[in-house]
Amino acid sequence: MRTPGLIDPHVHMREPGGEHKEDWESGTRAALAGGVTMVLAMPNTKPSVTDSDTLATALSAARTKAVCDYAQFLGAGSGNLTKAATLAPFTAGLKMYLDQTFGTLKLNNMEDWLNHFRNWPSSSPLCVHAEGPSLATAILLAELTNRPVHLCHISLRSEILLIKAAKERGIPVTCEVTPHHLFLSQDDVSTIGPGRSEVRPMLASRADVQALWDNLEYIDCFATDHAPHTLQEKDGENPPPGFPGLESALPLYLTAAAEGRLTIDDIITRSVTNPRRIFHLPEQPDTFVEIDPQARWTFSAANTYTRCGWSPFEGYTMTGRVISVTLRGKVVYQDGKITTKSGSGQNIRPALNGIQ
Ligand code: DOR
Ligand code: ZN
Ligand code: ZN
Ligand code: ZN
């Protein structure tokens, strides 16, 4: 069976500054192994991507290392309110952190929230990490400023019901859900382990998970929020939040399809068609994934490309496997091997200062 290359609109590549967890090479290799041919990278790196210099740093690394196509988000800060908008064409979009998570990008001042919503061009995507009451605020700001807003990693019943109500009223919001919030709950914390289970939003109750499945029609995108941290960090004193996800996502969706919980069309709509529309992404010609939908196999982090070395889905029996990936006419992944050169991925946005 053949599907289009998947688009993951929410990944953390960790470069610059976190290359021991992941870099543009290991992260995009993981993407291809997962059937993902385009990634949108988050800005909570070290330093954060908030201006033209830091954007250039991230894009230069991507240019020499990436093996799939990509774009880089800019982070909203309290110091880049007006300057940010001039960089919009060169970015995947603007990412705003309304709640605390990994990194230093949380915006504490609500006035900055409104101003970023006002200043960022409405033709460019604006994404928010907003949980619970902050999510309600983000929806209000979308209504007040009359601009599209994408709500990252929804995890709660209360959140999906609020989004449903907002959509029914015509407020221009879209949302994404991660595989870990669809396939894991608080009940899995004891198996995964307390430090490794740390993730933002936290794993939710089984009732929350069920509400996501019951309201699938209001979920626009599947996004992994691939957030690699090493095993040493996850099992250490202050475990940072985040799960790797690029290599387990499509197998999990295909397993759900084999069980009759999703259709292949459900997967493609949320992993290709909708992300392409919401984030204004180009089509990738001659790009597809060969899948064996019947293959039964055991997922093991030992066989992954991500540098973090673990997975919350360790030992899961999957039904459905990526056999090969073709990107712009070239076989780039086959039978577990990456078959393309570092730097063969393309920035899908215009060049910033000649950095393409
Ligand atoms: O668990 C998370 N990890 N949630 C986030 O929002 C950030 C991410 C990270 O960068 O590690
Ligand atoms: Zn987030
Ligand atoms: Zn994230
Ligand atoms: Zn468009």
Image (cartoon, grey):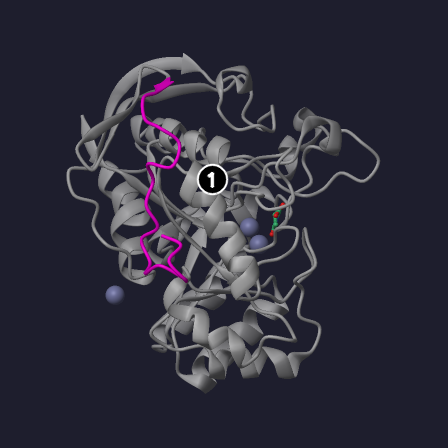
* Residue sitting at x 38%, y 47%: 70
Vertical side of 163 occupied by 339: above or below: above
* Residue sitting at x 74%, y 33%: 233
- In depth, the one of 173 and 310 nearer the eye is 310
* Residue sitting at x 67%, y 30%: 230
Tell me the quarter of the picture where residue 322 sits: top left
Which residue is identified by label 1?
179
Kindly tell me whether residue 323 is visible in this rendering: yes
Tell me the quarter of the picture where residue 309 sits: top right
Q: Magenta: predominant secondary structure element? A: loop
* Residue range (magenta): 337-356
Residue 61 placed where, x, y %?
Answer: 49, 44
Tell me the quarter of the picture where residue 319 sits: top left
Binning the other alpha carbons within 10 Å of mark 1 as few (below 14), some (14 to 19) or many (20 upward) gives many
Q: Is residue 269 left or right of residue 246?
A: left
**Membership of 303 in magenta stretch:** no
Vertical side of 238 occupied by 193: above or below: above
> Which quadrant contains ligand 4?
bottom left
- In depth, the one of 142 and 227 nearer the eye is 227
Q: Is residue 27 left or right of residue 234?
A: left
Q: Amino acid at mark 1?
A: Pro
Residue 106 placed where, x, y %?
Answer: 67, 64
* Residue sitting at x 58%, y 63%: 130
Kindly tell me whether residue 154 is visible in this rendering: no
Vertical side of 23 occupied by 115: above or below: below
Q: Is residue 152 left or right of residue 45?
A: left
The image shows a total of numbered marks equal to 1
Q: What is the secondary structure assignment of the residue under circle 1?
A: helix
